[in-house]
Amino acid sequence: MNAAGIFTKFEQTHRTWGMRLDGLGDEAFQRPASGGGWGIGQICHHIGSVTEMLLENAEKCACGDGKEMGFQFQPALIMLFGSLPPVRINVPDLPPELSHFANPTALGAADARDTLERAATQMRSARDAVSEASSRCRRRHPAGGWLNATQWYAMTEMHYRHHLRQLARLRAISSG
């Protein structure tokens, strides 16, 4: 899929996030998940932080800041499926400078919504550079292998969509 198609899919996912968060107040965003795990405000913080990192790598690839490589099986397989697995994922061996991705702070309702809007703006801003990028310039993802700009961009959309499942679980628990 090209950058325009990825962005269209992202916009749909972004709208779904907005609809599912409508009507939730600060208490819902600040409430920790029962039985451990992240609450809604933590998920939003995590998505914002990871979106920045993923798009930074997409833009670096688009500018030629990476390794020139040909076909890579692992990222191609992820792209073939078009989504992250429908299970909880722990990225192995995060370097210390990335450990904050695994321990997000809870955001209030307004900050969480602003964070998701910033993510949408970042996706929109990166689209043109990604669409013109070489598919051979790659940077290493901690769990996904060597990705090119389009794959980093697609991973951003997949990650955003992946956490919709988590949001659905939390909403089901809180309403049931």
Image (cartoon, rainbow, N blue to C red):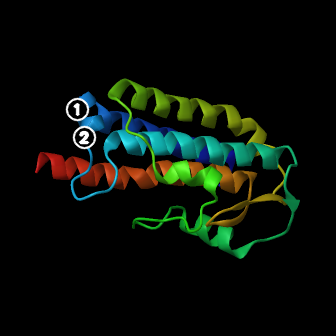
Q: Picture quarter containing residue 13?
A: top left
Asked if residue 113 is positioned above or below residue 151 in the image, the reply reads above
Q: Quadrant of residue 142?
A: bottom right
Q: Nearer the viewer, residue 126 or 60?
A: 60
- Verify CB contact (< 8 Å) between mark 1 and mark 2: yes
Please, what is the three-letter code of the amino acid marked with disc 2?
Arg
- Residue 56: x and y in percent read 70, 43
- Residue at the (54%, 62%) spot, across then down: 82
Q: Which residue is mark 2?
A: 31
| Helix, strand or loop for disc 1 | helix
Residue at position x 36%, y 38% from top?
41
Indicate left or right for 7 with 70 as reference. Answer: left
Question: Three-letter amino acid code at disc 1?
Answer: Glu
Residue underneath mark 1: 27
Mark 2 crowdedness (10 Å alpha carbons): few <14, some 14-19, many ≥20: some
Instruction: Identify the residue at image location x=42%, y=27%.
Output: 111
Q: Position of residue 37 (x, y in %)?
A: 32, 56
